[in-house]
Amino acid sequence: MKTRKLRDLTVSAVGMGCMGFSHGYGACPPESESIRLMRSAYEDYGCTFFDTAEGYSAGENEILVGKAIKPFRDKIVLATKFMPEIFITTPEIPEGKTSRKGVRAAVDASLKRLQTDYIDLYYEHRVPANRDVAEVAEWMGELIKEGKIRAWGVSEATPEQIKRAHSVTPLTAVQSEYSIMERKYEAEVIPLCHELNIGFVAFSPMAGGFLSGKYTSKDVFKGDDVRRAITRFKPENMDANQALLDLLKKFAADKNATPAQISLAYLMCKNDFVVPIPGMRRDERLKENFGAADVELSVAELAELEAALAKVTIHGDRKDSDIQKLGTIKTVAKS
């Protein structure tokens, strides 16, 4: 597996988003199968970047990831996130979660669930608009000095928030949604990350699986599946977005690749500090997604793809507020 730099952290060019092993995308694999797949990611494909969060299934995902990576913990980069006040919706969360004391309690609980004594990359899981991110940056600096975390990052932050946080304690990564279907961060955030030497971690790089071409407007999403709240997955929008899939299939055929691989390669070939973290819960998906690291798009091919994409209209989007209404983000983390 090729590697990339997130500031001072070296990670595999494609990481593994682990949320789907616990919730968010329909029925989950049994624990033993999830552990097997995570270990296969490392042992068979060289994945050294695993992403989780305390909010994924009320901490259960961290517990699962901790079990899976235990045999090779010191060989990989482990990322997790704490939940700021923007997500607090239940009475079990004490007031002032986003406080120095609250953050320290959160990191200690994550360390326990993950069965580790340090976290490589610790994110603020979204940045509340009504708080000064510089305050959080100061607390992160303390945790770095104490060795509890090696580096920190923010998720879905604005350029102004990134600059302010970075000026206090340098950011290692910004994690936000980024895919061929969602490119808003190309305007300001990604160029800013390049300027400040901050890595960019792309979550949902497959647009919830749509870019794989495996779903149609006839598919029904049930339970806590976040796609129930993502308007791209409304039947009429899935049909309307077929034009994008047709385009990807054409490029994929020319490169002897799959649409999923072209989708991931597009992100990686545009910027060498962008690392996608797709979710994958089947052996075929591991082979396909990690294989995208070897798909090269030339400057001319990227330009051709960009020109074609400019003619395609994307229908629907993904909003945190809509997803929160499903109750899929569990803010009460078990220790």
Image (cartoon, helix red, strand yellow):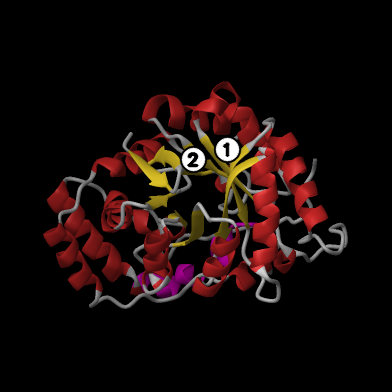
Q: Is residue 266 above or below residue 2?
A: below
- Which residue corresponds to the image point at 40% horizontal and 50% vertical from the top-left? 275
Instruction: Identify the element where label 1 is drawn.
Output: loop
Query: From the viewer's perspective, is 287 left or right of 127?
Result: left
> Residue 263, percent across and down?
31, 56
Instruction: Identify the element where label 2 is drawn.
Output: loop
Start-end of magenta stretch: 224-239
Does the segment drawn in magenta span residue 207? no
> Residue 306, percent across and down?
22, 69
The residue singled out by tag 2 in the image is 281
- Which residue corresponds to the image point at 18% horizontal and 72% vertical from the top-left? 307
- Which residue corresponds to the image point at 26% horizontal and 48% vertical from the top-left? 258
Query: From the viewer's perspective, is 253 left or right of 213?
Result: left
Label 1–label 2 contact, CB within 8 A: yes
Q: Quadrant of the N terminus?
A: top left
Residue at far top of view: 71
> Residue 302, percent across and down?
19, 61
Q: Can the viewer see residue 32 in this picture? A: no
Which sits earlier in the primary sequence, circle 1 or circle 2?
1
Q: Main secondary structure of the magenta part?
A: helix
- Front-most of residues 42 and 31: 42
Label drawn at residue 29: 1
Rendering quarter of residue 303: bottom left
Query: From the viewer's perspective, is 285 left or right of 136?
Result: left
> Residue 113, percent across and down?
72, 36
Label drawn at residue 66: none
